[in-house]
Image (cartoon, rainbow, N blue to C red):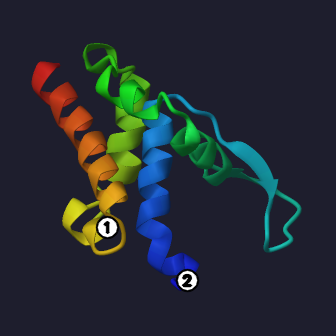
Amino acid sequence: MTNASSNYPCLEVLEAVCVMLDVKPVRVPDPAGSGKRLKDFWTPSQKLLGDLKFLPMLMEYDKDNIPEKTVNVVREKYYNHPDFDPKKIRSISAACEGLCRWVRAMVVYDQVTS
């Protein structure tokens, strides 16, 4: 059994996929007890992964019309992070590796066509 920190890159990949697909996070209470509500992409990620239309959503993604705000968030928060690397993620999950490659490909495509 793996701990949460070893799955952290996978959670980041799923979060990036949610951002690309404009899937909004849910707000959850801060586990540290600060009283703040934090953005949580885990619940929406689970629903997304369970959706039978998930793979078609990725394959039919409108890569020619990615909102600038979306690609900027993904580029700044995920793409440039050293752990957002398919080779590193492969050791944790082959599925997350594929999703990471998809996110990275969408960012590169946007750079090339812009």
Q: Left or right: 72 with respect to 30?
A: left
Tell me if residue 94 comes above or below residue 15 in the rendering. Answer: below
| Picture residue at 37% right of the left edge, 52% below the top | 78
Q: Where is residue 90 in the image (x, y as percent from the top left)?
A: 26, 67
Res 3 label: 2
Crowding at mark 1 (Cα within 10 Å: few <14, some 14-19, many 20+): some
Q: Which mark is residue 58?
A: none
- In percent of width and height, residue 76 lies at 36, 46
Identify the image quadrant of residue 48: top right
Q: Which residue is drawn at 30% across and 26% down?
A: 59
The Cα atoms of the two marked residues, 1 and 2, are separated by 17 Å
Q: Which residue is drawn at 62% across and 42% down?
A: 47
Disc 2 marks a residue whose amino acid type is Asn
* Residue type indicated by callout 1: Asp
Pick the front one: 91 or 77: 91
SS of the residue under disc 2: loop
Q: Can you give x and y, in whole percent of width and height, for residue 74 in the image? A: 38, 41
User: Does label 1 or label 2 sit earlier along the sequence?
Assistant: 2
Instruction: Residue at 39% x, 20% y: name it.
Output: 67
The residue wearing badge 1 is 83
**Quarter in which the C terminus is drawn:** top left
How many dots with numbers? 2
Q: Do the residues labelled 1 and 2 touch (CB within 8 Å)?
A: no
Question: Does residue 104 appear left or right of residue 14 in this picture?
Answer: left
Q: Which of marks 1 and 2 is in front?
A: 2
Which of the 4 quarters of the picture holds residue 9?
bottom left
Q: x, y (%) of residue 55?
A: 38, 33
SS at circle 1: loop
In the picture shown, does residue 5 fall above or below 11?
below
